[in-house]
Image (cartoon, rainbow, N blue to C red):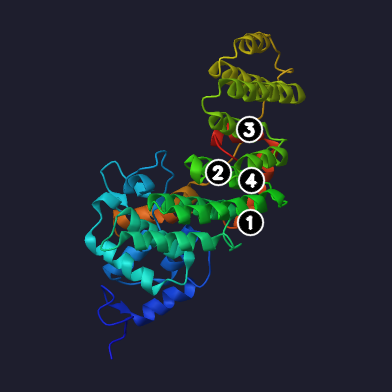
Amino acid sequence: MPNVTRIDAGELNFEWDRDLVATIKAVLGQVAETYELSSLVKGVLSGDLEEHVKALVRALDYHQRRPSGRRSSADARYGPMMTTTEGYAYPEPLSSLAPETALAWADATRIFHANDVVLARLGDLLWSLKAQPRPDLHARTAQAAMRRLWARGEVASVHRADALIRALELASELQDLALVSEIAADLVSAIRETLVQEEWAPGVAVPMIEALSGLPEPSQPADVEELIAESRRRYADDPFIIESLSLLQMQRAGGDAQQRQRIAREAVEMWRDHADRRGGLVGLAHLERALELARNEGLVDAANELRLLIQQPRSADELGMQEIAGEVTVPTEVIEGFVNSFVNTSGPEETLARLATHSPITDVDSDMRLVRDQMHEFSLSTHVLAGGHQ
């Protein structure tokens, strides 16, 4: 009997080595981020691999994006992790994918269906490609896996939230209103769960609220306004988050100009209040944020008043500025060894794969705690550099 995995005669598109499948399933027995699973799978593979096995690995290496438009191409949703100026990309763009790769992914959804992270990724890729004969089944498989992930604490909450948001998008793309309603209810529960947790997670709650608010009005849950109000109370100490929620409320005001201006005035006053409390360079940045909002919303009097405040001369001491310098020495042999670890390879594909999977992080939990602490202590630089939710 050949040492290959078969589900039913003729059901798989390729012959998968039974031992290799068992090895991959062993490392996929845990639920983790997609990039972590990619590293784990690569760590147990060696020698010359068949192309359908390589296709599985590449599926886990795509960079998932969040397109701005509701209707987007496959390449807008998933992009290569690395590209070169010569036009080489790893993994290959979905628009230039070989048909055999999609067939290998279809096999993998049947063989490795026990891991929801893998199932969600493969199903979404196949739906994005509109893989025949029933692309809708791939979308339904993906959204179900994404919804199950919310209960898996092994995955960071921000990624579980992204999965729920994507599940809602898939239901909308399928034009399945009943499914949209079910997943919207999942999101409401997830938001409420996030808001009562000790973890400071506006980057989890706010995007989910935005996703619900982006639904057509008949499909929106009745809880959206209440969730926005709860979020404002939970994250009241962070003006950047409150501004995001205010902008969302302004968007929801639609053509009600008076309501929109009322919300805008409250947001401007919020920035001024935080500027008074913080003072220094941070306070000045808050005033500039208030001015931008006042100008955009046609609050002429408030904008003129803010300009006068910002133009007042301030000394370096008043701005809380001080000179900070440091020096770091890195031995030449350390630099050369690091560079050679990427250069001395069998070719550009291996070089890009090494670059794409390299990470200096050794203790994820410790580094996440450090980043959160710094985000709270240095909120201005966090928002200037990241430009998004904390």
Question: Which residue, as the protein is rendered here, is positioned at the far right?
Answer: 277
Against 299, residue 128 (above or below) is: below
Circle 3 — which element? helix
Measuring 73% from the left and 51% from the top, which residue is drawn there?
Answer: 198
Tell me the kind of residue under disc 3: Phe
Q: CA distance from mark 4 to mark 3?
A: 17 Å
Q: Which residue is mark 4?
A: 371
- Asked whether the residues under the numbered discs 1 and 3 touch, taking CB atoms below 8 Å apart as contact, a structural biologist would say no
Against 269, residue 4 (above or below) is: below
Q: Nearer the viewer, mark 3 or mark 2?
A: 2
Q: CA distance from mark 3 to mark 2?
A: 14 Å
Q: CA distance from mark 1 to mark 4?
A: 10 Å
Q: Nearer the viewer, mark 4 or mark 2?
A: 2
* Callout count: 4
Measuring 42% from the left and 38% from the top, which residue is drawn there?
Answer: 68
Q: Is 342 left, or right, of 300 in this rendering?
A: left
Of marks 1 and 3, which one's residue comes earlier in the chain?
A: 3
Circle 1 — which element? helix
Circle 4 — which element? helix
Circle 2 — which element? helix
Tell me the kind of residue under disc 4: Val
Q: CA distance from mark 4 to mark 2?
A: 20 Å
Q: Quadrant of the C terminus?
A: top right
Q: Residue 240 got which mark? A: 3
Measuring 29% from the left and 68% from the top, which residue is drawn there?
Answer: 52
Q: Nearer the viewer, residue 318 or 212?
A: 212
Q: CA distance from mark 2 to mark 1?
A: 23 Å
Q: Which residue is mark 2?
A: 207
